[in-house]
Image (cartoon, rainbow, N blue to C red):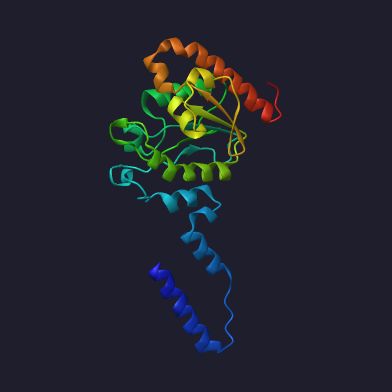
Amino acid sequence: MTDRKSQIISYIEEELETFGGPLYMPESPVLKESAISDPQHIENLQDYHESIQDCQQCSLGSTRTHFVFGVGNPHADLMFVGEAPGEREDMEGVPFVGRAGKLLDDILKAIELTREDVYIANVLKCRPPNNRDPNREEIDLCEPYLIRQIEMIKPKLLVALGRISATTLLRSSDSLTAMRGQVFDYHGTDMVVTYHPAALLRNPNWKRPAWEDFQKIRDMYRSKRGEQA
């Protein structure tokens, strides 16, 4: 920011020396400076990522390896939201990698989609130590980043992956079983709830109901896009 101010001062001095007063200043530098000081004014997803990736609002900022922003189509109509990065995600800076990520990729393929078609993110952008559940302070500080991502991506359908993600976003204490099959409103966007891929690896008996969920997700997605279900 100091370099930016120095450039502005130099520009003013050069203009005054060359042309005298009154001085004409274009609006664009001021607007750009405002956007930098307030990331919520940024409209480009990549620029927004760069503006918040050094976040130190909570203690997780000092323990993370990577800030895990999200991945996929920045204009996706379908967006998946998990709980928080795990160890592999923290190391690689990408959400849903490893065995759980491979399973999610396989499920997407089964409904004729890829990561390039959807967007994948988490409620938290940093890994909680030992993969513990996010606490209330971390959620309150980090969830605005997710909300802003959703505002920029403008998905037609959100999918909360797992009980923790769903109860966190919905401020609910309901079980995953109770939330499945319903359509919720999350800041103006329809949201449904299903199993986290890691849970399916731990309990293969949940794969059948998860597949039922994803068939419904596929049909909702196509319907919202005006496609034949």
Query: Quarter holding the N terminus?
Result: bottom left
Q: Residue at x 40, y 49 (%)?
A: 53
Question: Is 54 drawn above or below residue 210 in the view shown?
Answer: below
Query: Quarter holding the C terminus?
Result: top right
Q: Is residue 125 visible?
A: no
Q: Is residue 200 left or right of residue 41?
A: left
Q: Is residue 154 visible?
A: yes
Question: Is 68 drawn above or below residue 131 in the view shown?
Answer: below
Q: Residue at x 59, y 37 (%)?
A: 155
**Quadrant assignment, res 87:** top left
**Quadrant assignment, res 164:** top left
Q: Residue at x 44, y 79 (%)?
A: 10
- Place of residue 134 in the rendered image (x, y in percent of width and height, measured from the top left): 37, 35
- Place of residue 154 in the rendered image (x, y in percent of width and height, measured from the top left): 60, 40
Q: Nearer the viewer, residue 54 or 226?
A: 54
Question: Is 41 drawn above or below residue 13 in the view shown?
Answer: above
Q: Nearer the viewer, residue 129 or 210?
A: 129
Q: Is residue 42 left or right of residue 228?
A: left
Q: Residue at x 43, y 69 (%)?
A: 4
